Amino acid sequence: MRGGKPVARLVPVTPAFNRVRARQAVANIVDRSKGVTLGGLDLKDLVDEGRR
């Protein structure tokens, strides 16, 4: 406490990083992106256009 007011709040530790769940999330993203195209556009041209 500082000046009678709390300066921090103690909270329980959150569970550790779940590597299996993270890998599943990445696999889902990759699966959903299959078949998605830019319709013949070049990614570099789109990035350059976004910078203008």
Image (cartoon, rainbow, N blue to C red):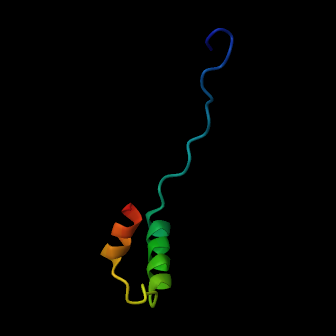
Q: Which sits in the foreground, 8 or 51?
A: 51
Q: Is residue 47 left or right of residue 2?
A: left
Rendered location of residue 35, percent (x, y): 45, 91
Rendered location of residue 11, percent (x, y): 62, 36
Q: As displayed, is residue 45 above or below residue 2?
A: below
- Residue 52: quadrant of the picture: bottom left
Q: As displayed, is residue 45 above or below residue 11?
A: below
Q: Is residue 11 left or right of residue 20?
A: right
Q: Which sits in the foreground, 7 or 19?
A: 7
Q: Residue at x 60, y 21 (%)?
A: 7
Q: Which sits in the foreground, 32 or 7?
A: 32
Residue furthest to the top? 3
Q: Residue at x 48, y 74 (%)?
A: 24
Q: Residue at x 33, y 75 (%)?
A: 45
Rendered location of residue 29, percent (x, y): 48, 76
Rendered location of residue 8, percent (x, y): 60, 25
Quadrant housing the N terminus: top right
Q: Residue at x 33, y 68 (%)?
A: 48
Residue furthest to the right? 4
Residue furthest to the left? 44
Q: Is residue 42 left or right of residue 36?
A: left
